[in-house]
Image: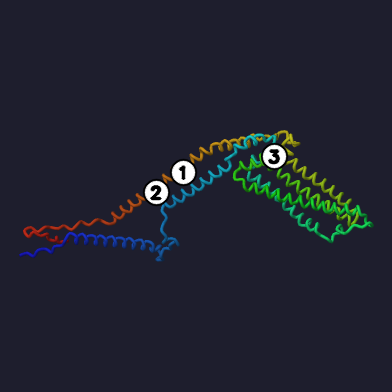
Amino acid sequence: AAMPFRTHSDGEHKAKDRRRRRQLIQRLLAEEAAEDSAEADSDNGDGTPEARPPDADAEPRGPDVDDEKNAQTEANLRNESVLEWWKKCSGLHTVEKWVSNYNKHPAGWGALLMIQGTSEVTSRLRSKVDNYAMYSALFLSFTISGVFNLNSTLVRSCDAQYGWWACEITKRLYFYGLALGIVAHMLCIVLAMGFNNALNEAPRDADVFRMFARGQGYRATVKVQWAFRVGSFSTLFSMTICAQAIIGWEAAIFFALAFVVSCWIYRNTVSRLFRSASIVNYWREEKGGKPDADDPYDLYIPLQCFKERSSSSGDIAYRRDELSVLMAEEERSEERSEEVDDIVQRTSVHSIQSAKVAPQPDSGLAGGRGSGQKAHKPRR
């Protein structure tokens, strides 16, 4: 009688098939890794191994990573441009009427804001008031010490031989002049600080325009200028009184002549500079300027550009809603594209693995006729 085949259960056959497939996949992966390493270490033709870059072992960046970074960079640049547009246009409609009447301004700072821009004009004004404040502090450094110098000639007690009335008047003129100089220089410093602090809190271009329209920013700079001049003249007057008490009236005469000559030189030099370049002293005829015949004071182009920006500021509420809708749509499209990319990536990985690993046919089981049992089918 023929010996029956050894039988196995269906679970044992399936477990064996899974083990065989796992081993086949591991063998294929090992062969692929060996081929990659062989290509990396292949010769250049002279028997020397091929040089590999330092980042050869690093995980390569796919096009998806580069596209994501480029999209993020473009989004950042777009946000910066939108913010810059909002900063320059928001609120300009509140000062459009004042800017349009540039011919009636007491000075040319409103026109300069239209022509040069708020950044340039505020930088110039900061430099102006900072210089006045710095030199005022320099004057304060010695005027305060002069007030409290008890060894000065003017601090001595007046006697009848020197002239009691003349001595008392001289002392008072000296100290009152120094006191006025100290107060004026302190006023110059605090005005400059207040002007800078106000500019520091101006968030938009419209706020800088409004600071000159309603806050009279130009007059604030003029007050800084005159405070420095008054303080300097008062200090110089006290110095002249002190020199007259020590030397005599010849010192006062010398100081007076030197002061007149200095003022004459200053006036001739600075006035010529202003008459040739200032927006008021050269360009505006109603303020005493004398422009060239073919160079009238016409700000049509800067004013039209300002009105365009002002009209854009009226649409900011609509633009804000539109921008929020566009940004929301972009976020949704990015999420959908990421989901599609994940699905495509998973599908491609699955197809590659399916192509590399061929499915093995299941083991066929033949039933033994006449015996009532399933026999194990022999393999090739």
Please report the residue visible at 62 percent of the width from the left and 42 percent of the height from the top. 207
Q: Quadrant of residue 289?
A: top right
Mark linked to residue 182:
none
Instruction: Give the CA distance from mark 2 to mark 3.
Output: 56 Å
In the rendered image, the quadrant that contains the C terminus is: bottom left
Horizontal side of 36 relative to 167 (left or right) equals left
Residue 364 seen: yes
> Three-letter amino acid code at disc 2?
Glu
Quarter of the image for the N terminus: give it. bottom left
Label 1, label 3: how many angstroms apart (C-alpha)?
Answer: 42 Å
Pointer 3: residues within 10 angstroms few (<14), some, or many (20+)? some
Report which residue position mark 1 lands on. Answer: 327
340 and 181: which one is in front? 181
Q: Position of residue 104 (x, y in %)?
A: 70, 35
Label 3 belongs to which residue? 108
Left or right: residue 366 versus residue 194 is left
The percent coordinates of residue 363 (x first, y second) are 18, 58
The answer to whether 48 appears left or right of 319 in the picture is: left
Q: Amino acid at mark 3?
A: Gly
Give the foreground label among 2 and 1: 1
In primary-sequence order, the first of circles 1 and 3 is: 3
Per the image, label 3 sits on a secondary structure element best described as: loop
**Residue at the image point whose x is 31% and y is 61% from the top:** 29
Q: Which residue is mark 2?
A: 338
**Whole-percent x, y for residue 25 in the image:** 28, 60
Vertical position of residue 165 compared to residue 210: above or below: below
The residue at the far bottom in this view is 47
Element type at mark 1: helix
Q: Residue most toward the right?
A: 161
**Helix or strand or loop: what does disc 2 sit on?**
helix
From the viewer's side, name the closer residue of 112 and 44.
112
